[in-house]
Image (spheres, grey):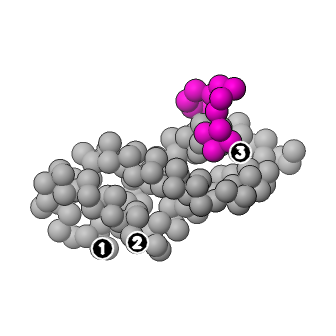
């Protein structure tokens, strides 16, 4: 294992979530790799979304909470450039071995990754208030 791989695994921290003998490969990947990365990168995701709002959704702050939650979801699902940027923030913290696992099932893992990120941002919607 390279120094980078060792550093990344230590830096990201422990597995988050339950792992059992019945856990699927995707579930293992989610709890061992994705959840710790999403937790580690949370402040960057929040900052990135605030920047996205300032450039693309100036009226975000005038909407109801329900509409804001829809905007969060739609921004990540439909804006491919923004989505790819967020994916890069996650994939950049994979080890080479983890990346090789990821590319074997990237479609399913991307859905998990973005779903978890959407829920994470929605749960912090209060952070996306205008600060004038």
Q: Which residue is mark 1?
A: 56
State the image quarter where residue 74 is shown.
Answer: bottom left
Is 51 on the left-hand or right-hand side of 64? right
Give the number of the mark in front: 2 or 1: 2
Q: Residue furthest front?
A: 22
Tags 2 and 1 touching, CB below 8 Å: yes
Helix, strand or loop: magenta stretch = loop
Q: Are marks 2 and 3 in contact (CB under 8 Å)?
A: no
Can residue 28 be found in the magenta stretch? no
Q: Report the front residue among 104 and 73.
A: 104
The dot on residue 8 is 3
Q: Between label 2 and label 3, give the one nearer the viewer.
A: 2
Residue drawn at point x = 22 percent, y = 56 percent: 68
Residue at coordinates 27% horizontally, 61% vertically from top-left?
71
Bin the neighbour count of mark 1 within 10 Å (Cα to Cα): few under 14, some 14-19, many 20 and up: few
Relative to residue 66, is residue 29 drawn left or right? right
Q: Compare marks 2 and 3 and give the one earlier in the sequence.
A: 3
Label 3: which secondary element: helix
The quadrant of the rendering that contains the C terminus is: bottom left
- Does 75 appear above or below 125? below
- For label 2, the residue is 79
């Amino acid at each position: 294992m390279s120094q980078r791989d060792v550093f990344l695994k230590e830096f990201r921290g422990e597995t988050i979530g339950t792992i059992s003998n019945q856990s699927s490969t995707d579930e293992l990947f989610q709890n061992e790799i994705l959840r710790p990365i999403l937790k580690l990168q949370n402040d960057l995701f929040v900052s990135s979304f605030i920047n996205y709002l300032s450039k693309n959704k100036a009226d975000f702050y005038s909407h109801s909470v329900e509409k804001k939650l829809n905007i969060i979801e739609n921004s990540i699902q439909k804006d491919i450039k923004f989505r790819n940027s967020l994916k890069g923030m996650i994939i950049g913290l994979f080890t080479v071995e983890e990346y090789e696992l990821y590319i074997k099932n990237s479609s399913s893992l991307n859905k998990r990754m973005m779903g978890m990120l959407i829920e994470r941002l929605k749960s912090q919607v209060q952070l996306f208030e205008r600060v004038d």
